[in-house]
Image (cartoon, helix red, strand yellow):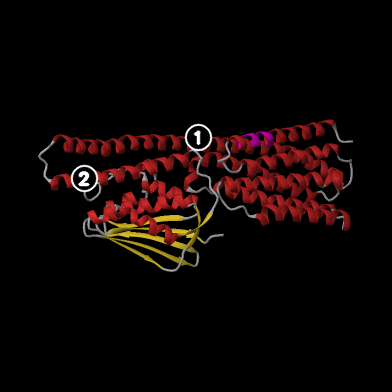
Amino acid sequence: MEQFSLKIIIVIASGISLIMGFYMLLIHRNSAKVKGPVFWAAGNLMIGVGFLFRLISPENGFWATAAPMLLITTGLYVYLAGIWQFKEKRIIRWIVIGLPALDIFQSLLFFYLFPLNRVRVGLHLLVLIFYSVISIYEMLQLDDSKQYLRHIFRLNAISFTAFLVLLLAGVGIILDRPGYTPAQINNIWIIAFGVAGGIMTALTFGFLSAVNMQLYTELEGQLKSKTKFFAIIAHDLRGPVGTIMNFLNLLNTEKNLKEEEKLMFMENMEVLSQSTFHLLQNLLEWANTSQNLAHFEDELIELNQLVSSNINFFKSLTQMKSIHLEYHNGEAAYISGNAKMIETVIRNLVSNAIKFTPRDGTISITTRNNKNGVRLVVEDTGIGIESKRLTRIFELANSRSSQGTEGETGSGLGLALCKDFVRKNKGTIRVESKLNAGTKVIIDFPSPV
């Protein structure tokens, strides 16, 4: 019979892991946007069940000695999947699934067919050492978007290092103490995993802190975007609406206006009303996506047809500025996504090109198939973009309204909306531009599934 103190260690380690697992599930439920907690919850629960299973299993045999450790190891690798998902990296399945499966196979092999306890435990430790090395590496490798987590992840790396040292010490015990019985080795590892349970608890608190920091950072970004959003509404609606009111007032009060002047006022009001309508469309569509109202089922879209129908919307604007609008399309170009979102992207890009292209300039729109999918290019001979603005041009918080070549108003909202909608439709967008030479916007959509 195991000592009472050993059972207490197992109960504490199991209880902590199970509580942390259920708490992680609660976090996942309340913050579904943060990726990772669901895997950490599953990993903690498996570790907790592994410890608990040791208490209720028979005193000897495979279920008493090997099964609990295999459950704990599998839980740790599920935990690793959570780290990858939290960092928005691809989960390497052959590691997360393959190594625990290999550990189960070798444990069965060296327990039943070739009873070699030291070999079995040694291979089991190698699987765990591999896990620790990968985890330490992942904790120390952060991309720029998650640098705010570097201190927490470094502390987690220290915990993983302690876990690795514990495992290496275990390898030394097995090699230096060949006289230990299977029961003695098993008890040593129950104690070792009791200590490891404490380390994993520290890791869990570390990841809880990381989740909270990510939620706070996202909330802070949303608040900044919301402030910018309402500033755009206040500034860009007040301007054109006020100007239209002034034109209407002149038309009503000035009885001696010439026909040429009236025509000029009417043309200006048409341009202002179109740009105001365009802005309102953007605001409404942005608001819908911000409130998660724009979930959609993918539909098959013929991009050439979508571009052609939206180009007609801008004919009067291009005629007023004597801009030559070219559309080059080849064979049918099919993509998968949401037509309304992609229409919004097309309208924004063409509207921007008209706004920043001087009279007698050229705007060229091209769609073509390639080996990876479909490419849409909108290119103009306009005033271009400064290089220092180009790197942050898609960020709503850093966008600013700029006047067009003939004083056209803008919001700074369009390109941020384009990037968001392109991303939602599994595409990528980038901008190439030279000051006073023109701008090219390139969008790549993947082939439809």
Q: Tell me the SS state at disc 1.
A: helix
The residue pinned by badge 1 equals 216
Q: Nearer the viewer, residue 260 or 157?
A: 260
Mark 2: few, some, or many residues within 10 Å (few <14, many ≥20)?
some
Q: Give me the residue at 23% from left, 36% from top.
A: 245
Seen in the picture, residue 10 relative to 266 is either above or below; the reply is above
Residue 439 placement: quadrant: bottom left
Q: Position of residue 321 (x, y in %)?
A: 22, 55
Residue sitting at x 13%, y 46%: 259
Q: CA distance from mark 2 to mark 1?
A: 49 Å
Specify the farthest residue to the left: 256
Q: 1 or 438: which is nearer to us?
A: 438
Q: Main secondary structure of the magenta part?
A: helix
Kindly report which numbered mark, 2 or 1, lies closer to the viewer in this rendering. Answer: 2
Query: Which quadrant: the C terminus?
Result: bottom right
Report the front residue among 374 and 437: 374
**Residue 89 point in image, percent of width and height:** 56, 51
Q: Which residue is mark 2?
A: 266
* Callout 2: SS: helix
Q: Amino acid at mark 2?
A: Met
- Give the residue at x 75% y 54%: 101
Percent position of residue 348, x then y = 36, 50
Residue at left offset 40%, top offset 56%: 430
Of callouts 2 and 1, which one flags the residue occurring earlier in the amino acid sequence?
1
Q: Is residue 274 magenta?
A: no
Magenta-drawn segment: 21-27
The correct choice, above or below, for 342 with respect to 192 in the image is below
